[in-house]
Image: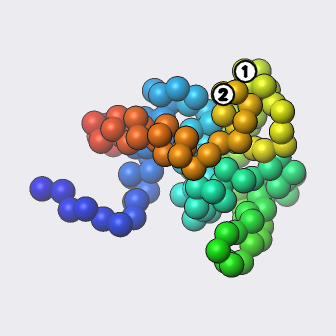
Amino acid sequence: MQVATEYLSVKDVERLVLAAHYCAHPERNSCMIKMCFLHGGRINEITALTLRYIDFSGRRVYVRRARHDISGYHLLQPKEIISLQRWLLARRKCYPARSDLLFISSRGNKMTRQRFAKEKYPSANAASCLRL
């Protein structure tokens, strides 16, 4: 019997990221999942990130916090940098970029909290079937 927890473990996140590769928009979804987990970000904080907040040369990202938390720079992990680069490459090739937002929908609009949750559920269902 599995015990329900209020947080995700590293293994849970690895399952989600792996499962995201089998769903629509794999580069974007896996990158968003990683960034939410690694930076402790709320969905609305991650979807509000812009391209100017990413500093590849300094290997950091500026996370603007909601709800009166402290905003600041966070270091990017090597796997996260690779994931971001893959997403940006896919974004340039396949998605109409009408904004400076880092994560956009397939139509080029801002990713909403609801859209992210809707796209995460297939990943979560697939992840529950995977064993790492």
46 or 79: which is nearer to us?
46
Residue located 78% across and 62% down the image: 62
Residue 106's disc number: 2
Name the image quarter holding the N terminus: bottom left
Name the image quarter holding the C terminus: top left
10 or 52: which is nearer to us?
52
User: Where residue 34 appears, x then y in whole percent?
Assistant: 57, 50
Q: Rounded to the nearest whole Å, what is the CA distance between mark 2 and mark 1? A: 8 Å
Residue located 38% across and 51% down the image: 12
* Residue kind at label 1, given as amino acid type: Cys
Residue 26 in view in this figure: yes
**Which quadrant of the structure image shows residue 109?**
top right
Callout in the foreground (2, 1): 2
**Which quadrant of the structure image shows residue 41?**
bottom right
The image shows residue 113, relative to residue 28, as above or below, that is below
**Left or right of 18 in this view: 127:** left
62 or 48: which is nearer to us?
48
Tell me how the rendering is colored: rainbow
Mark with earlier residue (2, 1): 1
